[in-house]
Image: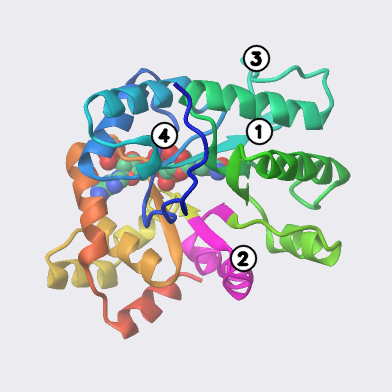
């Protein structure tokens, strides 16, 4: 049975998100395992090319059946992906207008996840790398209608530059509640976008914290901090991320890494170490 938005205040955004990209047939089991290990935030997308959203729904159903969690315990986030980001397995009619595509894609997501609402609905990426376009405005307005209808609590944008966000602000477009970006250490961990978000109380979610920053994981500073804290370099990076206001995503397929990623929340890094990591590479 589909669940509807809670009457009481919904649970806040969790402090770690489990990402479900690239898991294919393992998606249901890994989603269930992530919930079993303690994750309460799940990130997916209605983009069959990289995600198996229906499989996420199967994992959720298994977790509900096992009594691990209820829908109200979870923060479910999914995305609308433009046609160029998709393969042939589309969640909408490509001949329909963009507004209709948004409605169709979200209806399909709610079906996949067997829920009446998601906690966050994210535009996977603007239509142009350079500018926030009229197409993005149409999609964004359609997403706001979905929120007003109660089918998502929050709205977000992903893979955005500072320029995109500034253009939204300059056009007095309603700003997102969430930004989800790839975090390169060599760009000061997306410093410019993070600062924009911090000033406007936008939740900044960071992905590829490990995979985009292999050199950081092998840096002597990180190795020393890890040894001092009896932690792994990955745990240092995740703890650093949270300390500077990044809500981290992990897509690990490994049970032990799930445990370690969540346990990184319990570390405390010295302030000078946090500052040093922030400007380690950029
Ligand atoms: N908006 C977008 O365009 C976009 C793009 C990419 C990703 N995402 C989201 O972000 C999620 C995460 O993606 P990601 O790019 O950050 O990469 P990822 O898929 O999370 O990959 C992380 C890598 O780090 C390893 N790892 C994780 N925890 C570790 C630990 N404690 N110790 C050592 N290795 C560890 C994993 O290996 P093991 O599996 O062996 O642990 C894996 O190879 C995705 O699933 C997706 O939901 C969004």
The correct choice, above or below, for 153 with respect to 1 in the image is below
Res. 252 image quadrant: top left
Q: Estimate how packed mark 4 is, as few (under 14), some (14 to 19) or many (20 or more) residues with alpha carbons within 10 Å.
A: many
Mark before the other along the chain sequence, 3 or 1: 1
Question: For the residue with label 4, is its CB less than 8 Å from the closest atom of ligand 1?
Answer: yes
Q: Looking at the picture, how far across and down is residue 1, in whole percent?
A: 44, 21
Question: Distance between the Cα atoms at labels 2 and 1?
Answer: 21 Å
- At 39% from the left and 36% from the top, the residue drawn is 71
Question: Distance between the Cα atoms at labels 4 and 3?
Answer: 20 Å
Q: Tag count in the figure?
A: 4
What label does residue 193 carry, if any? 2
SS assignment at label 4: loop
Q: Estimate how packed mark 3 is, as few (under 14), some (14 to 19) or many (20 or more) residues with alpha carbons within 10 Å.
A: few
Which range is magenta? 179-205
Question: Distance between the Cα atoms at labels 3 and 2?
Answer: 33 Å
Mark before the other along the chain sequence, 4 or 2: 4
Mark before the other along the chain sequence, 3 or 2: 3
Question: Distance between the Cα atoms at labels 4 and 2?
Answer: 24 Å
SS assignment at label 3: loop
Foreground: disc 4 or disc 3: 4
Mark before the other along the chain sequence, 2 or 1: 1
> Which residue is tagged 4?
20
Label pair 3/1, CB-CB below 8 angstroms? no
Label pair 4/2, CB-CB below 8 angstroms? no
Foreground: disc 3 or disc 1: 1
Locate ligand 1 by image quadrant: top left
């Amino acid at each position: 049975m589909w669940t509807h938005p809670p009457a009481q205040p919904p649970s806040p955004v969790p402090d770690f998100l489990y990402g479900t990209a690239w898991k294919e047939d393992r998606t249901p089991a890994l989603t269930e395992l992530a919930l079993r290990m303690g994750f309460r935030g799940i990130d997916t997308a209605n983009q069959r090319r990289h995600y198996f959203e229906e499989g996420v729904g199967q994992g959720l159903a298994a977790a509900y059946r096992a009594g691990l969690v209820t829908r109200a315990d979870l923060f479910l986030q999914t995305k609308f992906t433009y046609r160029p980001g998709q393969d042939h397995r589309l969640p909408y009619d490509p001949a329909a207008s963009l507004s209709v595509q948004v409605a169709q894609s979200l209806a399909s997501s709610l079906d996949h996840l067997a829920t009446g609402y998601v906690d966050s609905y994210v535009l996977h990426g603007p239509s142009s790398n350079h500018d926030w376009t009229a197409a993005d405005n149409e999609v964004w307005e359609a997403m706001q209608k979905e929120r007003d209808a109660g089918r998502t609590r929050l709205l977000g944008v992903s893979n955005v530059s500072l320029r995109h966000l500034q253009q939204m602000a300059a056009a007095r477009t309603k700003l997102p509640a969430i930004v989800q970006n790839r975090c390169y250490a060599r760009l000061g961990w997306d410093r410019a976008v993070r600062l924009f978000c911090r000033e406007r109380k936008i939740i900044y979610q960071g992905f590829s914290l490990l995979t985009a920053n292999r050199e950081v994981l092998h840096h002597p500073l990180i190795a020393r901090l890890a040894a001092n804290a009896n932690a792994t370099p990955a745990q240092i990076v995740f703890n650093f991320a949270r300390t500077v206001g990044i809500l981290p995503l992990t897509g690990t397929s490994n049970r032990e890494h799930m445990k370690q990623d969540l346990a990184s929340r319990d570390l405390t890094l010295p302030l000078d170490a946090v500052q040093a990591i922030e400007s380690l590479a950029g």
